[in-house]
Amino acid sequence: MANTLEVAISELGNLAMSASKTVRINSLCTVFAESEVVSLIARGELPADIALALHDAIATRIATMARRVGLKKEPFSPAEPP
């Protein structure tokens, strides 16, 4: 996605932080999501707004997967000294 936006992957986070509005990426498949990104670019959306949309889409996907498998709190175990 960084290549599609023509930015370095290390710049995606900072770029997203400068977004001025919210746009949506609905595809769960990366191939279709990239097509959405290309469409957003063609529509004139700013790269920062698209970068934020990508972050939102990834976070939503991870949250959905975590809810599906469930979360279980691990018992605390202090690190043993070397």
Image (tube, rainbow, N blue to C red):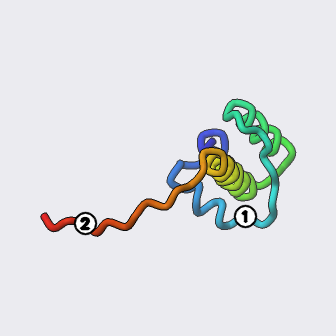
As drawn, the residue found furthest toward the right would be 43
User: Label 2 sits on what residue type?
Assistant: Ala
> CA gap, disc 1 to disc 2?
40 Å
Do the residues under discs 1 and 2 have CB atoms within 8 angstroms? no
Mark 1 and mark 2 lie on one chain; the one further toward the N terminus is 1
* Residue 55 in the figure: left or right of residue 37: left
User: Label 1 sits on what residue type?
Assistant: Ala
Which image quadrant for residue 11?
bottom right
Residue position for label 1: 19
Please, what secondary structure does the residue beneath circle 1 have?
Answer: loop
As drawn, the residue found furthest toward the top would be 31
Which residue lies at the image location 77% right of the left edge and 66% below the top edge?
20
Residue 54 visible in this rendered orientation of the protein: no
* Residue 63 in the figure: left or right of residue 76: right
Closer-to-camera residue (25/6): 25
Quadrant of the frame with the C terminus: bottom left
Residue 4: image tag: none
Quadrant of the frame with the N terminus: top right
Estimate how packed mark 2 is, as few (under 14), some (14 to 19) or many (20 or more) residues with alpha carbons within 10 Å. Answer: few
Please, what secondary structure does the residue beneath circle 2 have?
Answer: loop
* Residue 81 in the figure: left or right of residue 3: left
* Residue 30 in the figure: left or right of residue 21: left
| Vertical order, 29 against 51 (above or below) | above
Q: Residue 37, position in %: x, y?
A: 75, 41
Residue 79: image tag: 2
Q: Residue 74, position in %: x, y?
A: 43, 60
Which residue lies at the image location 58% right of the left edge and 59% below the top edge?
13
Closer-to-camera residue (49/44): 49
Which image quadrant for residue 78?
bottom left
Which residue lies at the image location 84% right of the left edge and 49% below the top edge?
44
Q: Residue 3, position in %: x, y?
A: 60, 40
